[in-house]
Image: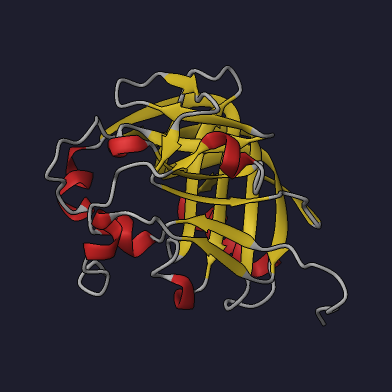
Amino acid sequence: MIELDRIPPVLVNASVRAAYLAGVYDGFITVKNLRARGDFGLGAADMNDGEVVALDGVYYRALADGTVRALADDDLLPFMTVVAFRPDRRLRVTGPLAGTQLEARIDAWLPGPNRLFALRVRGRFHQVTAGASAAQARPYRPFAEVFPEYRMIRHANVSGTLVGFRAPAVFRDITKQGYHFHLLSDDKRAGGHVIDQAVEDVEIEAQELHGVEILTPDTAAFHGADLVLAR
């Protein structure tokens, strides 16, 4: 039961996934302002020039060339899903375990498919395939046309962290339905949107979230986007 006299942990979304899918890639909120709302999360860089992962309060950009850079306070972001991460449960998992098997293991551990969780998976991975896109040029194309051009890199025997969320279907226009992870390696040399992984030995930390706050862009591109067709 949620206690109304306490502020429950909530997911904070800068823009919504439907706008990102429609090609609204221009940044509108600074890293500094967003960090005040969340020290953990994932999203996209300005002009969709790389994938963003926030871990321990630092926001990193994984680029299409495979490098990773820390973002500055005044860098603008077009889409992010963040939370003040305070895990309330932990699970140790040893492999070898493929990505779909890992998700099934987490499903068996976490309660209810209609509940929202932030997830941190850290440890050793047999492999992680992750990547990003290069900067897009205006007029921006919908994400469905951009994603096939992502450069995906397979990283073998990597130690690092998967930052992510498990979201029920009702949130599909806000953030990605199901599991969504971004990688940040311990040496900060690899990162990006994850499409496949296999774990060796990891600790999974989860935090249940009890609400969603949306920060919408006040831009012509956002106001003019067809957010229904973007589904």
Q: Which is more toward the observer, 10 or 225?
A: 225
Q: Which is more toward the observer, 186 or 96?
A: 186
Q: Tell me the quadrant of the picture where the C terminus can be found.
A: bottom left
Q: Which is more toward the observer, 130 or 10?
A: 10
Q: Which is more toward the observer, 123 or 47?
A: 47
Residue 137 visible in rendering: yes
Q: Position of residue 187 (x, y in %)?
A: 58, 17
Residue 96 visible in rendering: no
Which residue is rendered at x = 29% and y = 59% of the image?
222
**Relative to residue 73, is residue 86 drawn left or right?**
right
**Relative to residue 166, is residue 23 drawn left or right?**
left
Which residue is rendered at x = 58% and y = 76% of the image?
113
- What is the quadrant of residue 184 in the picture? top right
Q: Position of residue 209 (x, y in %)?
A: 68, 65
Which residue is rendered at x = 47% and y = 72% of the image?
171
Q: Tell me the quadrant of the picture where the N terminus can be found.
A: bottom right
Q: Position of residue 225 (x, y in %)?
A: 23, 63
